[in-house]
Amino acid sequence: MSNSGITRRATLATGVIAAASLTTTGFLSTPAAAAPTALKDATPKPSAKPPTNEELKEAIRRAEARRRRLATGRPSANGWEMQKAVDDDGDIVTCPVAGTGLTVALRMGDVETVLVHVIRRFHYEVDALGADEQPRPLLGWVAPSGVRDSRRPESNQASGTAVVIRPGSYPAGVRGAFSAGQELAIRDILADTEGVVRWGGDDRRPQEGLFYLGVRPGDARLSQVAAKIRGWNLTPGAGAGVVPDVTEASRRRRAARYS
């Protein structure tokens, strides 16, 4: 008796499960890197009940609809894929910034952990955000349709990997918005991220309100720094909210490595 029907069914199930796996975090961030994981996760589990043909068709339809709704196929300047929408079953979500009463749209996971840490320390140590009733103290994700040049660092907002603090207050091309003491604090904050986050104030065309991911998808440094920050968040007396002496010699030397 031919088993071709079973083979076709197993093959289709594998393809659908792989397609459905693209709806998890990673599909929009780095499609090429996500493929091996999708194939590995697509292995049918012996104990799982095989899906019906209608269930397979529906899974394919949902995965394709999500791809059309969210995927752009275009990377921002740092190599992360720009996404068409936020809070729409994608990788970019509106997340709270603890201790500030604010929210910001960022790529969830390690990116969110690292950039929220930067925002919190800025709030505590550089200048309080939202204290003067500003209508928009933070701007994270922006629609890719508004990106004029995907080679510029600000395009990273469209991939959920950048935030602008007080948009409009620190004009692009202008330096000197922060005092010497504030810049010391910013340097110390960047050192926490070990080079994973870059400050727009260091760019050739400065944008001093911009902080963005300076590493590409798959860079191990991102997950390492995010794990460190999560550890701080669980440890009393560590992380954002504990104001350090940023003028201390060892901290100055550490900050200098990432300037």
Image (tube, helix red, strand yellow):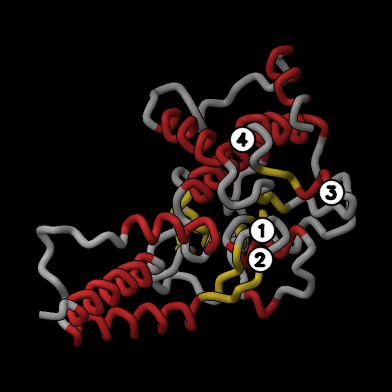
Look at the picture and state if 15 lies above or below 54. Answer: above
Disc number placed over residue 79 in the picture, else none = 1
* Contact between labelled residues 2 and 4, with CB atoms less than 8 Å apart: no
Left or right placement of residue 244 versus residue 68 in this view: right
User: Residue drawn 19% across and 82% down?
Assistant: 5
Q: List the residue tagged with mark 2.
A: 75
Give the secondary structure at mark 4: loop
* Alpha carbon separation for disc pair 4 and 2: 22 Å
Q: Which residue is mark 3?
A: 203
Give above or below for 217 relative to 9. above
User: Residues under labels 3 and 4: Cα distance?
Assistant: 17 Å
Which amino acid, by three-letter code, is at mark 3? Asp
Please name the amino acid that badge 4 sits on. Thr
Q: Nearer the viewer, mark 4 or mark 1?
A: 1
Residue assigned mark 4: 193
Q: Nearer the viewer, residue 92 or 60?
A: 60
Mark linked to residue 71: none
Instruction: Give the Cα separation between the discs numbered 1 and 3.
Output: 17 Å
The residue depicted at 88 percent of the width and 55 percent of the height is: 205
Which of the two residues, 131 or 173, is positioned nearer the viewer here?
173
116 displayed left or right of 20? right
